[in-house]
Amino acid sequence: MLDAASRTNARLAGVLLWPALVSLLTILLALTGCATEPRLSNSVTTGLPQHVLLDGTPFHGQRDYQCGPASLAMVLETSGVDASVDALIPQVFLPDREGSVQPEMQAAVRRYQRISYVIDNDFDALLEELAAGHPVVVMQNLALPVWPLWHYAVAIGYDLPAREIILHTGMTPGRATSFRTFDSTWARSDRWGMVALAPGELPASIEPSDAMEAIADFEKLNGAAAALPAWEALTRRFPNYAMGWFALGNARHAHGDFAGTIEAFQEAVWRDPGFAAAWLNLGLMQKSLEHKERARQALQRAASLSGKWQDAARRHLDRL
């Protein structure tokens, strides 16, 4: 679930443009100045495939005000979910606002047993996801900052030599657009992009804290058992991230894997010896399995660390 600030910053999308309006906007955009070519890192230009086309991504024409549901259906179906546009409309379409906002889009992904990851807001991240086989829902402002017309499309490929991005957009599948033109519209949404992945898959490029937030939101709705493969994947990708091991330990405990719980909490405190909550949980887990001396050692470590868990650790230590 996104916080209040995220909802405040959410933008509405879903408007299709009449041809006459498109022509007018083209003139107005031309008057605002020339867009610049997005800068790509050397690792992207030399390390990624020169051409990518995810031609297995289904296409759904985006009817009036329904680019959000159609875009979601495309990425969800690619991930193996049976998700029709008609079923998604009541979940994300806001009739009074004639469109969809990002929090509702992300919540819908979670209801279909997929995890919604917002990618880094730069062109490198977009191309890296496509190279990894992940179609990306992107948000564009097809008009002016002072007169926005928000729109969702699905990026399904790119052509590096031609400097083109390939989109399922509007009523046109596989439309090639120059990097420059696309980025000028994408930048107005702060380059918002989202992938919908099965638990156990991670985006090609993501910070561990961002991945953890996305998985935690998924777990709140779907439970620890459903999220377990995602926590496992997080610790494989970021083995030195103590919070990931801590979350994995909690998920394993909820799943009834007590030996795995202890292992995960041990990994957490090994990587962060000052992690009081992990020491406390490790001690309580050892105590529940009647490993009295191991429990004492862990609780003593927790009790020695100042902070909000210190009193609880001391109480449990006294009762041991």
Image: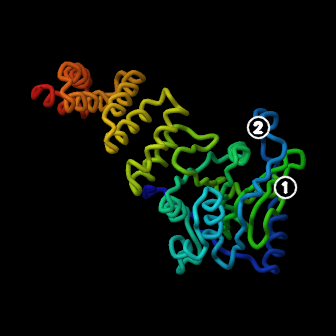
**Whole-percent x, y for residue 9 in the image:** 53, 59
Residue 311: which quarter of the image?
top left
Mark 2–mark 1 Cα distance, whole angstroms, equals 17 Å
**Residue 268 quadrant:** top left
Q: Which residue is drawn at 40% across and 25% down?
A: 267
Q: Quadrant of the N terminus?
A: bottom left
Residue at disc 1, secondary structure: strand
The amino acid beneath tag 2 is Val
Looking at the picture, which amino acid does disc 1 mark?
A: Ser
Report the front residue among 75 and 305. 75
Residue 204 x/y as whole percent: 64, 41
**Nearer-the-camera pick, 168 or 23:** 168
Residue pictured at 77% horizontal, 80% vertical = 18
- Residue displayed at 36% across by 25% down: 266
Residue 262 location, quadrant: top left
Q: Disc 2 marks which residue?
A: 44
Query: What residue is shown at x 36% (from left), y 32% (from top)?
Result: 260
> Is label 2 or label 1 in front?
2
Q: Where is residue 261 in the image (x, y as percent from the top left)?
A: 34, 33
Q: Is mark 2 on a helix, strand or loop?
A: helix
Asked whether, in this view, residue 14 is left or right of residue 273, the answer is right
Answer with left or right where residue 89 lies relative to residue 191: left
How many numbered callouts? Answer: 2
Farthest residue, direction right: 162
Q: Which of marks 2 and 1 is nearer the N terminus?
A: 2
Nearer to us in this view, 311 or 107: 107
Quadrant assignment for the C terminus:
top left
Q: Mark 1 points at which residue?
A: 178
How many neighbours does mark 2 have within 10 angstroms: few (below 14), some (14-19), or many (20 or more)?
Answer: some
Q: In this view, does 229 lie to the left or right of 263?
A: right
In the rendering, at what x and y percent does residue 31 appear?
83, 64
